[in-house]
């Protein structure tokens, strides 16, 4: 008796299920900024983890399972000002943040998660980097 593998069944399963490696499954949790790039003028600025600590800058984002986001930040980049709570959603490789008080002031980032690092990128209409940040997931102590 010979067994055959039906690849169409496997393909249907892959497309119909939410795999563990997908970003929407990896994103929930608390993330801490450890490096960022910005291009406020003509030069690209880069602050690494030691620079952020020395300057007293921090940014932690908590992505909750059901599309809520809360953040704690003391950070010089000018977006999501005076907002600590937002709703979030993913559309392809874009992360959209909607402040609860002013949902029409949506912020959009390109994002990727690889090797346990969340990367958020936001550019202006001229293609200059407003923010390119790298976040590590904070493991909850049990």
Image: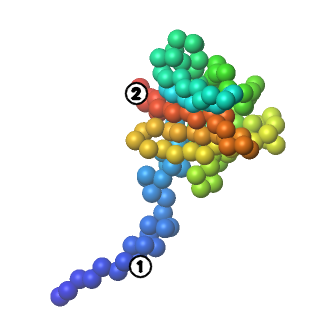
Q: For this view, does 3 lie left or right of residue 93?
A: left
Q: Quadrant of the N terminus?
A: bottom left
Task: Decide which of 45, 6 is in the foreground and name it.
Answer: 45
Residue 9 horizontal/vertical position (percent): 41, 77
Q: Quadrant of the C terminus?
A: top left
Task: Decide which of 121, 90 is in the foreground and name it.
Answer: 121
Q: Measured along the vertical axis of the image, is residue 25 above or below residue 76?
A: below
Residue 140 horizontal/vertical position (percent): 44, 29
- Residue 78, image quadrant: top right
Q: Nearer the viewer, mark 1 or mark 2?
A: 1
- Residue 141, image quadrant: top left
> Residue placed at 45% from the left, 57% from the top?
19
SS assignment at label 1: helix
Q: Measured along the vertical axis of the image, is residue 24 above or below residue 8?
A: above
Residue 31 horizontal/vertical position (percent): 52, 32
- Residue 8, image quadrant: bottom left
> Residue placed at 48% from the left, 63% from the top?
17
Residue 14 horizontal/vertical position (percent): 44, 67
For label 2, count other residues whose C-alpha is less than 10 Å away and answer few (under 14), some (14-19) or many (20+).
few
* Residue at the extreme front of the image, as rendered: 42
| Residue of label 1 | 8
Task: Decide which of 125, 51 is in the foreground and name it.
Answer: 125
Dot 1 or dot 2: first in sequence order is: 1
| Residue of label 2 | 142
* Residue at the extreme bottom of the image, as rendered: 1
Check residue 42 in the rendering and tell me which mark sits there, or answer none: none
For label 1, count other residues whose C-alpha is less than 10 Å away and answer few (under 14), some (14-19) or many (20+).
few
* Residue at mark 1 to residue at mark 2: CA–CA distance: 42 Å
Q: Is residue 70 visible?
A: no
């Amino acid at each position: 008796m010979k067994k055959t593998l039906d690849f169409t069944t496997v393909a249907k399963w892959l497309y119909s299920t939410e795999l563990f490696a997908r970003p929407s499954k990896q994103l929930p949790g608390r993330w801490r900024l450890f490096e960022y790039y910005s291009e406020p003028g003509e030069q690209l600025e880069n602050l690494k983890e030691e620079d952020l600590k020395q300057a007293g800058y921090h940014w932690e984002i908590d992505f909750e399972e059901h599309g809520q986001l809360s953040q704690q930040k003391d950070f010089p980049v000018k977006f999501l000002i005076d907002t600590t709570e937002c709703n979030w959603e993913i559309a392809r490789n874009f992360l959209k943040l909607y402040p609860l008080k002013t949902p029409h002031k949506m912020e959009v980032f390109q994002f990727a998660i690889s090797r346990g690092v969340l990367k958020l990128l936001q550019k202006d209409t001229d293609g200059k980097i407003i923010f390119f940040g790298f976040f590590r997931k904070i493991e909850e102590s049990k």
